[in-house]
Amino acid sequence: MIVCSAAAADTIRATVNGMVCGFCATGIEKTFKAQPEVKTVEVDLQNKLVTIQTKQGQTMDDRKIKKLLGNAGYSVVAVARQK
């Protein structure tokens, strides 16, 4: 049986400026884990990368990602997606 790719989860990578410490990472993780469509979130401070894995069949639009990070005091440089 072939699973429809439209129902697949998204992996979203946001390049973010302003993250400098573990406290930054913890705050971002808490913010995204509170979103109903988010399965996991990882913050890579060295590479300025936030990787969000959405739940099966769900996604998160760029505008929401930028708003959540912007409200936390960070600037989003780029958002990339892969299925």
Image: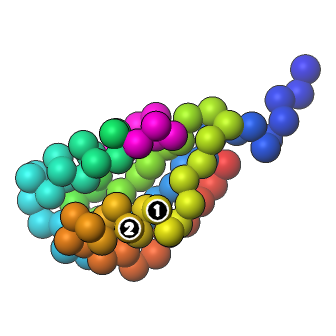
Q: Provide residue 58's location: percent of width, then percent of height.
A: 62, 41
- What residue appears at the point 60 percent right and 48 percent down from the top-left corner? 59
The prevailing secondary structure element of the residues shown in magenta is strand
Quick one: label 1, few (<14), some, or many (20+) residues within 10 Å?
few
Q: Secondary structure at mark 1?
A: helix
Residue 60 vs 40, above or below: the answer is below
Q: Quadrant of residue 50?
A: bottom left
Residue 66 vs 44, above or below: the answer is below
Residue 9 covered by magenta stretch: no
Residue 40 covered by magenta stretch: yes
Q: Which residue is mark 2?
A: 67
The three-letter amino acid code for the residue at tag 1 is: Lys
Query: Which of these two is toward me, 70 or 41?
Result: 70
Residue 31 vs 15, above or below: the answer is above
Q: Is residue 12 left or right of residue 34?
A: right
- What residue appears at the point 56 percent right and 60 percent down from the top-left corner? 61
Q: Provide residue 2's location: percent of width, then percent of height.
A: 88, 27
Per the rendered image, the range of residues in magenta is 35-42
Structural distance between the alpha carbons of marks 1 and 2: 5 Å
Asked if labels 2 and 1 touch by Cβ distance under 8 angstroms, the answer is yes
Q: Secondary structure at mark 2?
A: helix
Q: Which residue is mark 1?
A: 64
Whether residue 15 is visible to the viewer of this picture, yes or no, is no
Q: Provide residue 26's location: percent of width, then percent of height.
A: 17, 47
- What residue appears at the point 41 percent right and 42 percent down from the top-left corner? 35
- What residue appears at the point 41 percent right and 69 percent down from the top-left corner? 66
Residue 58 vs 12, above or below: the answer is above
Q: Provide residue 7's location: percent of width, then percent of height.
A: 74, 37
Q: Is residue 14 left or right of residue 59?
A: left
